[in-house]
C-alpha cells in the first residue's frame, strides 16, 4: 500500500498545481489513507482498507479535506459519486444545477471528531471559496452540494435531541424523495461492525456498546423493528 501512495503523490501534486490548489489542502486530503487504515485495523485487527472506491478518489487527488468535511467534484449522472437523485425528467424541470451533466459538489463526512454546526459552517464556507477559485463556474451557473448518507435519514430526529449535531447537520439539506435500506452502512460507521449473515439479531444488537446518544438511537430503532435508510439531499452552494 505504501508504494501505491508514494507513486501517486507526484501525479496528484502535479494535477493540483495545475489547478492552483495549495499544498496544505493536498496533503490534508491524502492523509485520509492513514485514517482508513487505522479504521480497518481497529475493526479487523489487520492492516488494510475496506473503502477502496473512496480511497481511489483521494489518491487521484479528487477528494478535498476542507475543515471538518470532505468534498468531491463531479458531474451529475456521469459519475459513481452521483447520489440518489430526482428522475431526470423532473431534474430537467428543476433547472440549472439539477440536470444530468451539471457540475456538482459531493459532501462527505470523515471520522474526525464532533460535527458541530460551527465546524460545518466553516467547511461549507471554505468549499464555496475553494471551488470558485479552483473549479470556477460561470456567473449564471447554480452549483449544488449534495450528500448521500444514512446520516440524512430523517428518522434520526425521532431518537436524537433537536439540538444534536446530526439533526442540525441533516436540516441543512433539502431531501430528495426516496431512500435505500442502509442498516449495514450505519452500523459499520458507528460501531465498525457489520450484521451477521442471519441479519440484525437480538444477540448482535446486545453485543454493541451503548455509550453515546447516537449509539443508543441506532440500537433502539432496530430493536423496535425499524430500518435505517440512506437519504440524499442538496444545498445551494452558490448561495453561500
Image (spheres, rainbow, N blue to C red):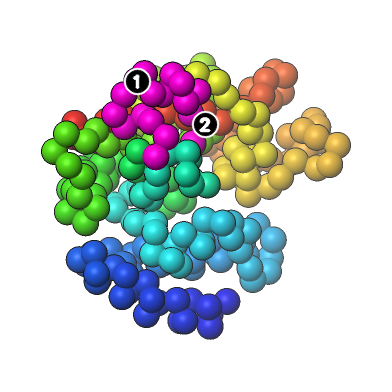
Circle 2 residue = 84
Q: CA distance from mark 1 to mark 2?
A: 16 Å
Q: Is residue 233 rendered magenta in the image?
A: no
Is 239 left or right of 117, judged from the image as shown?
A: left
The local secondary structure at tag 1 comes to: helix
* Furthest-right residue in this view: 198
Mark identifier at residue 94: 1
Q: Residue at x 57, y 43 (%)?
A: 190
Question: x and y percent of residue 27 in the render?
Answer: 33, 69
Does residue 102 appear in the picture of this structure?
yes
The local secondary structure at tag 2 comes to: loop
Magenta region, residue range: 83-101
Question: x and y percent of residue 219 in the render?
Answer: 65, 30
Which is the main secondary structure of the residues drawn in magenta?
Answer: loop
Mark identifier at residue 81: none
Quarter of the figure with residue 211:
top right
Q: How many tags in the picture?
A: 2
Q: Residue at x 41, y 52 (%)?
A: 112
Does residue 117 appear in the picture of this structure?
no
The quarter of the rendered structure image containing the N terminus is bottom right
Q: Is 223 situated above or below 200?
A: above
Mark 1 or mark 2: name the one nearer the start of the chain.
Answer: 2
Amino acid at each position: 500500500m505504501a508504494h501505491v501512495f508514494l507513486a501517486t503523490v507526484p501525479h496528484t501534486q502535479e494535477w493540483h498545481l495545475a489547478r492552483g490548489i495549495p499544498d496544505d489542502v493536498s496533503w490534508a486530503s491524502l492523509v485520509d489513507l492513514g485514517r482508513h487504515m487505522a479504521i480497518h485495523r481497529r475493526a479487523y485487527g489487520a492492516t488494510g482498507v475496506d473503502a477502496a472506491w473512496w480511497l481511489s478518489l483521494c489518491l487521484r487527488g479528487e477528494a478535498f479535506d476542507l475543515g471538518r468535511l470532505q468534498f468531491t467534484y463531479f458531474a451529475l449522472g456521469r459519475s459513481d459519486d452521483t447520489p440518489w437523485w430526482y428522475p431526470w425528467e423532473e431534474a430537467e424541470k428543476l433547472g440549472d444545477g439539477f440536470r444530468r451533466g451539471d457540475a456538482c459538489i459531493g459532501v462527505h463526512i470523515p471520522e474526525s471528531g464532533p460535527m458541530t454546526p460551527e465546524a460545518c459552517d466553516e467547511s461549507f464556507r471554505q468549499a464555496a471559496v475553494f471551488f470558485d477559485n479552483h473549479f470556477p463556474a460561470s456567473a449564471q451557473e447554480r452549483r449544488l452540494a449534495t450528500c448521500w448518507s444514512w446520516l440524512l435519514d430523517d428518522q434520526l430526529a425521532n431518537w436524537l435531541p433537536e439540538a444534536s449535531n446530526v439533526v442540525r447537520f441533516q436540516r441543512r439539506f433539502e431531501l430528495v424523495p426516496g431512500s435505500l435500506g442502509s442498516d449495514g452502512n450505519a452500523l459499520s460507521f458507528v460501531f465498525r461492525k457489520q450484521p451477521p449473515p442471519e441479519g440484525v439479531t437480538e444477540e448482535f444488537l446486545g453485543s454493541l456498546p451503548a455509550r453515546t446518544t447516537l449509539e443508543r438511537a441506532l440500537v433502539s430503532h432496530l430493536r423496535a423493528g425499524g430500518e435505517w435508510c440512506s437519504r440524499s439531499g442538496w444545498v445551494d452552494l452558490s448561495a453561500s
